[in-house]
Image (cartoon, rainbow, N blue to C red):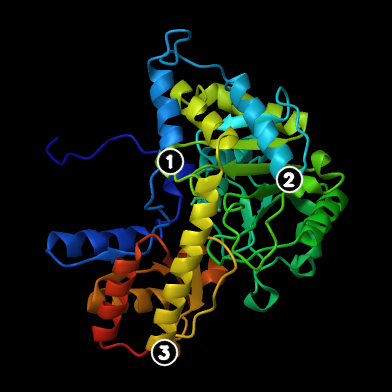
């Protein structure tokens, strides 16, 4: 391929995607690595732990299990055994009863499911309410549906919990979908059951599909309430769908295993889209997910302890530097307003931190318009590396207070 230009233009919906905000950050990292510089990446929320041995053993057993062939195509709905394991897990964890046949759909990671749900429910021009700061993949998936995005703020002084009164009345009337995510990426904010009650009522009143993303439900720290499911609220089944993931809770981010739960109709519509684009998860991973959900949940408890400990170390380190970051009640992130010297320019802040120290943070603007002026730190390195981060930051000529 001698650098010749491809002659066929891509679809408008792809051409019109805005440049990926993190592309610059990735480029910065690659250039520094190529130049042989020390880089510590705290930008991406990629767990550094590995899945527990019992989960790996379940995959290995399945690979060599001649009683069924996991190597062939699966079924669109996923294995019944996995759907039953999901139902039992929901019952144990949230006291919520689900029908494994019609109210559960295994996913190749929740990111896949969220994008396919939008395809199932958003026509071009429809409005989707995506409160921000938020998981950036929501924006891309909505734009690929040519949907219109309305972005109310998750305010720090409200604990990053959505205030429904901030949603424009006219938008509320025409919106088709609302996405909520607690515990929240990137802010670490949590909500209580009363919030889910409000959300269900609001969505019922406005005929809006309520999408609850609980990818971090198993990472609520000590001293706080154990995070809830929207389905603990009466009446949720008529308006809501919920997404769960094994990526963070069970250190399985690369395995791609998640699931959606909800009323029969929304699960069927999501399944209709999926049956046209994929063949469900690899059978070996489905059996590993069965083990993850029905075997010991120690890995979740261990991760809570681990991330809480790292949060404390990192918060203490930052505060010693003079950066007064808050201490989040959940997730594997620290979300903080950037020091005043950079005003609202989070890109300038993370760029200067990186250039002077080799420590890479995520710019808040990448998480939506209300992320501007903030930065996210992922707690994905061990204690020794956290120590090294603090050394590098202390040695850099930066103003934190
Ligand atoms: C809020 C949120 N939802 C969903 C996902 C995607 O998870 P999965 O690995 O299951 O696709 C992430 C990943 O970072 C996330 O932060």
Closer to the eye: label 2 or 3: 2
Residue 344 picture location, percent across and down: 47, 81
Residue at x 14%, y 59% (from the top left corner): 34
Residue for badge 3: 322
Q: Which of marks 1 and 3 is nearer the N terminus?
A: 1
* Mark 3 residue crowding within 10 angstroms, few (<14) / some (14–19) / many (20+): few
Q: Could you tell me how far apart the alpha carbons at marks 1 and 3 are, in whole angstroms?
A: 38 Å
Residue 317 picture location, percent across and down: 39, 80
- Relative to 246, is 316 on the left or the right? left
Q: Which of marks 2 and 3 is nearer the N terminus?
A: 2
Residue 334 picture location, percent across and down: 49, 70
- Relative to 284, is 329 on the left or the right? right
On-image quarter of the C terminus: bottom left
* Mark 3 vs ligand 1: CB below 8 Å: no
Residue for badge 1: 52
Q: Considering depth in this image, is 263 or 168 the residue closer to the camera?
A: 263
Residue 52 picture location, percent across and down: 43, 41
Q: Is residue 206 above or below residue 389?
A: above
| SS for callout 3 | loop
- Relative to 65, is 159 on the left or the right? right
Q: Is residue 289 above or below residue 323?
A: above
* Mark 1 residue crowding within 10 angstroms, few (<14) / some (14–19) / many (20+): some
Residue for badge 2: 94
């Amino acid at each position: 391929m001698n650098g010749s230009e491809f002659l066929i233009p891509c679809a408008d919906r792809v051409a019109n995607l805005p440049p990926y905000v993190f592309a610059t950050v990735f480029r910065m990292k690659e250039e520094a690595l190529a130049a042989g510089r020390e880089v510590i990446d705290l930008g991406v929320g990629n767990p550094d732990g590995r899945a527990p041995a019992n989960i790996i053993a379940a995959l290995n057993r399945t690979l060599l299990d001649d009683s069924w062939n996991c190597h062939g195509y699966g079924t669109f709905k996923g294995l019944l055994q996995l759907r039953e394991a999901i139902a039992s897990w929901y019952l144990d964890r949230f006291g919520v009863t689900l029908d494994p046949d019609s109210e559960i759909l295994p996913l190749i990671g929740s990111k896949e499911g969220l994008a396919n749900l939008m395809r199932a429910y958003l026509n071009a021009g429809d409005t989707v309410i995506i409160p921000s700061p938020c998981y950036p993949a929501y924006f891309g998936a909505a734009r690929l549906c040519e949907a219109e995005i309305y972005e109310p703020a998750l305010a720090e002084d409200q604990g990053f919990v959505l205030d429904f009164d901030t949603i424009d009345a006219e938008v509320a009337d025409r919106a088709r979908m609302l996405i909520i995510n607690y515990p929240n990426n990137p802010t670490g904010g949590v909500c209580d059951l009363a919030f889910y009650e409000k959300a269900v009522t609001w969505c019922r009143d406005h005929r809006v599909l309520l999408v609850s993303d609980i990818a971090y439900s198993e990472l609520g720290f000590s001293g706080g309430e154990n995070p809830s499911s929207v389905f603990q609220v009466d009446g949720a089944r008529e308006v809501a769908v919920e997404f769960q993931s094994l990526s963070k809770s069970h250190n399985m981010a690369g395995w791609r295993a998640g699931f959606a739960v909800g009323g029969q109709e929304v699960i069927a519509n999501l399944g209709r889209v999926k049956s046209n684009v994929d063949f469900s998860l690899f059978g070996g991973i489905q059996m590993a997910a069965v083990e993850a959900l029905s075997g010991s949940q120690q890995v979740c408890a261990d991760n809570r302890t681990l991330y809480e400990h790292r949060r404390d170390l990192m918060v203490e380190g930052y505060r010693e530097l003079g950066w007064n970051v808050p201490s989040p009640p959940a997730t594997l992130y620290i979300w903080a307003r950037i020091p005043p010297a950079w005003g609202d320019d989070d890109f300038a802040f993370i760029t200067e931190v990186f250039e002077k120290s080799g420590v890479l943070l995520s710019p808040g603007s990448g998480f939506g318009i209300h992320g501007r002026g903030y930065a996210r730190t992922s707690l994905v390195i061990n204690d020794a590396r956290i120590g090294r981060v603090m050394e590098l930051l202390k040695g850099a000529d930066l103003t934190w207070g």
